Amino acid sequence: MKILVTGAAGFIGMHTSLRLLSLGHEVVGVDNFNEYYSVALKEARHARLERFPGYCGYRADLADDAAIEKIFAEHAFDAVCNLAAQAGVRYSLQNPRAYVQSNLAGFVNILEGCRRHDVPRLVYASSSSVYGGNKKVPFSEDDRVDAPVSLYAATKKSNELMAHTYSHLFGLQTIGLRFFTVYGPWGRPDMALWLFTEAMLAGKPIRVFNYGKMQRDFTYIDDIVTGVVSCLQADHLEKEELFNIGNNRPEQLMTLIQVLSNALGIEPKMEMLPMQPGDVPATFADITRISAKLGFKPETPIEKGIPAFVDWYRAYHKLP
């Protein structure tokens, strides 16, 4: 297949593109290389993709109507995998317009490109953040998700509604994926695992929110990619699908810190802080639906995934 992957220089986008290329698919990547976090990291990820003859990359913003239309016009895509977004819950409190541009205006351009150029399938990233302050665990796709606690979450719920509309009106197959706290090599510098690792190696205290009483369904990148690629390749899915992709095993934040401490060989100094606006105390994915339909089964516990991240982090930063 020829597949458009947006956010190709991003964490999940790069790993997904690499997997697709290794399976023999052609990948057209799009990324705007914005400065939300290190552009050098994005360039390094993208350089890995450019080694493949089956890869073609564009530097463009999803909110640029003309640029996105041109990309769709130049290629006949068999599927689109929309992983580009302005990420981050806390950043959305200070920079709301960035989320409207990328996650709403940009997503409309992707939907329109699929509609106007007869792309049969769109797989797109949603987020576990749509569950808001849901106290029922594990989180099921059938739970109500109409009370987001951050603008980021609201834009992701909006994406699901927009995708539903295009499936209903134009017959576009849309498959939404609610990702649960993705981590691993080449991960994002604004995520807890990177921030903790960076601080501990520098001998600085780590900032532990909600006084450590947080639970997250940490999901290793390879497991996430397996789920995404299955959705792109499967031929038996409904016209409209929505799946949780998580590890189905919530971990205490303090457990993550202990596993990281073991991997680094450093005892952490901790600054215990209250819950931050927009955060939720716990996430926990019910993966019954994706397991039944696609045989999805996460294989990587944090005891294996965190040391893999640490090994990559040391190599990337040329640390001993």
Image: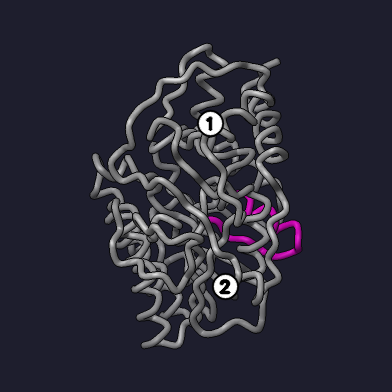
**Residue at image location 54% in from the left, 33% down from the top:** 193
Element at label 1: helix
Label 1, on which residue? 194
**Residue at image location 51% in from the left, 32% down from the top:** 40
What's under tag 1, amino acid-wise? Trp
**How is the structure coloured here?**
one colour
Along the line of sight, which residue is nearer the eye, 175 or 133? 133
Which label lies toward us, 1 or 2? 1
Residue 269 left/right relative to 36: right
Q: Position of residue 169 (x, y in %)?
A: 36, 88
Q: Position of residue 214 (x, y in %)?
A: 45, 40
Q: Say if the magenta span includes residue 125.
A: no
Element at label 2: strand
Vertical position of residue 130 compared to residue 36: above or below: below
Label 2, on which residue? 79
* First of labels 1, 2 by sequence position: 2
